[in-house]
Image: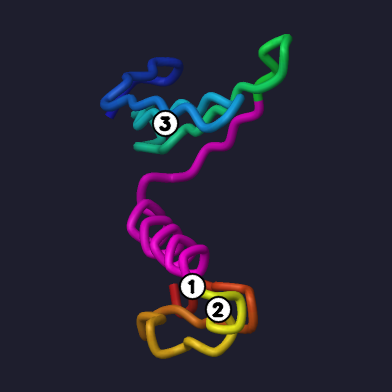
Amino acid sequence: MREQGQVETLFQAELAVERKQYQFTLCENHRGRYIRIVETSGPYGRQNDIMIPAVGLADMEVILAAMRQANEAPVHAVQDDRASVPPAYSNEGNVFRVVGR
């Protein structure tokens, strides 16, 4: 663990999609590890960021995989295909929820 105020970058990756830049950083501070996602867009480099505790990384991975699958499926199949959802998750219409955690 780090002392209060110290942040260490453990891993960093960048992604460019259309006119937006995304920076993914795995950090560690005195409270633990977390993922910081920064979106930079617009002509003035406007930034938005979110922090997610690293313990949520596995759930985030499942949700992103489900979103990718939904994006690749025909529109009618997105609502009808509930068999592909892992048991610890629930698919309620177009909302994908982590349950029992």
Decide: few, some or many residues near mark 1? Use Cα within 10 Å; few <14, some 14-19, many ≥20: few
Q: Is residue 71 magenta?
A: yes
Q: CA distance from mark 2 to mark 3?
A: 28 Å
Give the image location of residue 26, x and y in percent: 35, 32
User: What amino acid is found at the position of numbered circle 2 in the picture?
Assistant: Val
Instruction: Please state the horizontal and vertical placement of residue 63, each as a whole percent of the image.
Output: 45, 63
Closer to the eye: label 2 or 3 = 2
Q: Residue at x 44, y 45 (%)?
A: 53
Return the residue at label 2. Answer: 78
Question: Where, quadrant-wise, is the N terminus in this rendering?
Answer: top left
Give the amino acid at mark 1. Ala
Q: Residue 73 shows which numbered tag?
A: 1
Q: Is residue 74 left or right of residue 5?
A: right
Look at the numbered disc 1 and give the secondary structure of its residue: loop
Q: Are marks 2 and 3 in contact (CB under 8 Å)?
A: no
Secondary structure at numbered mark 2: helix
- SS at mark 3? strand
* Residue in front for this viewpoint, 90 or 40: 40
Is 64 covered by the magenta stretch? yes
Label 2–label 1 contact, CB within 8 A: yes
